[in-house]
């Protein structure tokens, strides 16, 4: 479903991605781990076209989305993204956040968007926060609204960029639980995370990145139990 | 003691003020109309120009910079005189009220541009990214996500700008518009007593004080909400 071919990204002279190749199939949960600054987030941001790759190609359902003539807005409608810093719209209620894109981008009818928005907020466990503004929500609640907001566009795949890194430890689980449910429902997911427990339990596929390259790739359990590359080994020893 | 009595007699003469007040009120009404009309047009000009500035559309951006520099960097009085007295030579013949509103609007537009630009740039860039990641176009992201948040933040500086504009509108007296200050000066020569100026000053305060109070209120409210 998502195929990345020889992706390079440079910021000025600094190479952040150095020839990344990935293939994610439908329904797979691809977890990307690695030390800070290894290019994990940049990779996700390239897939969502928030960063323009320096070279290489990204195919989404067979279409090269790095091609010039591609309508970025249409690609992004099909790819949900959740950020580390939530980025909820502070001037809208939880429901407003979830319905704004369906209303303005998909031109969905008001009742329909509202009905679907409420459904999604219930699904992420925020039934009693529907009309609450973001500044009255905890970090975990904010992030669950952000997930519902991305889901409201009915994306074909979801990108999670360190979505629990800004959360207090006791709020991490509620967000991961929502992601687990999502994975179980068959959503294709790319997850950049430092939550190794989650990576192992939910990840169908795992990638270890360092310095802009994929150093190890395979089934999550295999890599955790028996990492091959010395740097992957050192990293896992340090974090587990 | 005699000095004090003379001062009260010349500058705080109640009988004179009572007599000229109806004329001054009419002048004040003109001041409000001219300022409000110019502020509205200035906001429209400023909002559009600020969007040109933040999107950095090449040629337009340079034009916008020239416009802002030119009108913020020269005296408003000069701009009013140019628009009213110089433009007729190139065939643009605006009647005084229109020339006045044009000058004030274009001048305030330059200030409003910078207020909006600062406001837009103060919004966390994650907001634009989140909006774009949902598939919104740049324009929709601006319209539904960035600008509404900007409005809240720019209301205090925008109101301050409006207060400045109200006071600056007194410069329209040079092209014979009977706004508050000009009316007061006319009353002064008619009555041979400058108490009308004092009354005009009080009227200016009555117009501007609620606005400056409102700014303080908004600023403290924004601080509390943390938006």
Image: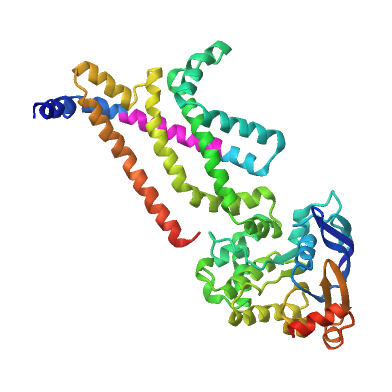
Question: How are the colours assigned in the image?
Answer: rainbow
Q: Vertical placement of A146 versus A177: above or below?
A: above
Q: Vertical placement of B176 versus B138: above or below?
A: above
Q: Vertical placement of A208 versus A150: above or below?
A: below
Q: Position of residue B24 (x, y in %)?
A: 26, 27
Residue A60 visible somewhere in the drawing: no
Horizontal relation, residue A104 to residue B119: left or right? right
Horizontal relation, residue A215 to residue A37: left or right? right
Q: Main secondary structure of the magenta part?
A: helix
What residue span does the magenta drawing correspond to?
B28-46
Q: Position of residue B96 (x, y in %)?
A: 43, 19
Point out the residue furthest to the top here. B89
Q: Nearer the viewer, residue B53 or B70?
A: B70
Q: Position of residue B145 (x, y in %)?
A: 60, 54
Q: Quadrant of residue B222?
A: bottom left
Q: Position of residue A51 (x, y in %)?
A: 77, 56
Residue at image x 58%, y 13%?
A: B90
Horizontal relation, residue B137 to residue B150: left or right? right
Point out the residue furthest to the left here. B1
Q: Quadrant of residue B63?
A: top right
């Amino acid at each position: 479903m998502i195929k990345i071919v020889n992706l390079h990204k440079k910021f000025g002279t600094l190479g952040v991605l150095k020839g990344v190749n990935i293939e994610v199939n439908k329904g797979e949960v691809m977890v990307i781990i690695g030390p800070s600054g290894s290019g994990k987030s940049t990779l996700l941001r390239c897939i969502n076209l928030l960063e323009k790759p320096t070279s290489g190609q990204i195919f989404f359902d067979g279409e090269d989305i790095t091609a010039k003539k591609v309508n970025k807005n249409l690609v992004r409608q099909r790819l949900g993204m959740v950020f580390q810093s939530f980025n909820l719209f502070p001037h809208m209620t939880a429901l407003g956040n979830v319905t704004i894109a369906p209303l303005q981008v998909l031109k969905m009818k008001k009742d329909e968007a509202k009905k679907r928005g409420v459904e999604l907020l219930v699904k992420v466990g925020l039934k009693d926060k529907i009309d609450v503004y973001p500044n009255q929500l905890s970090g975990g609640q904010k992030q669950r609204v952000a997930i519902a907001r991305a889901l409201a566009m009915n994306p074909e795949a979801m990108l999670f960029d360190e979505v629990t890194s800004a959360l207090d430890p006791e709020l991490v689980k509620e967000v991961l639980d929502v992601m687990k449910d999502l994975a179980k429902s068959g959503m294709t997911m790319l997850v950049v995370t430092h939550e190794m427990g989650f990576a192992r339990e939910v990840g169908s596929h795992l990638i270890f990145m360092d310095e802009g390259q994929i150093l190890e790739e395979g089934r999550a359990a295999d890599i955790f139990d028996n990492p091959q590359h010395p740097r992957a080994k050192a990293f896992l020893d340090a974090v587990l | 003691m005699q000095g004090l009595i003379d001062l009260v007699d010349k500058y705080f003469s109640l009988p004179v003020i009572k007599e000229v007040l109806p004329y001054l009120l009419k002048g004040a009404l003109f001041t409000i109309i001219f300022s409000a009309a110019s502020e509205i047009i200035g906001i429209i000009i400023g909002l559009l120009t600020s969007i040109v500035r933040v999107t950095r559309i090449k040629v337009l951006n340079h034009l916008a910079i020239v416009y802002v520099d030119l009108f913020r960097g020269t005296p408003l009085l000069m701009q009013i005189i140019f628009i009213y007295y110089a433009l007729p030579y190139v065939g643009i013949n605006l009647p005084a009220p229109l020339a006045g509103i044009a000058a004030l609007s274009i001048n305030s537009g330059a200030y409003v541009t910078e207020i909006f630009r600062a406001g837009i740039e103060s919004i966390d860039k994650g907001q634009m990214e989140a909006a774009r990641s949902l598939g919104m176009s740049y324009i929709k992201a601006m319209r539904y996500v960035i600008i509404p948040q900007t409005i809240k933040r720019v209301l205090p500086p925008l109101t301050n700008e409006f207060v400045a504009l109200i006071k600056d509108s007194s410069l329209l007296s040079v092209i014979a518009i009977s706004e508050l200050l000009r009316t007061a000066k006319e009353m002064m020569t008619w009555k041979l007593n400058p108490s009308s100026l004092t009354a005009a000053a009080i009227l200016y305060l009555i117009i501007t004080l609620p606005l400056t109070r409102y700014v303080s209120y908004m600023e403290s409210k924004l601080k509390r909400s943390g938006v």
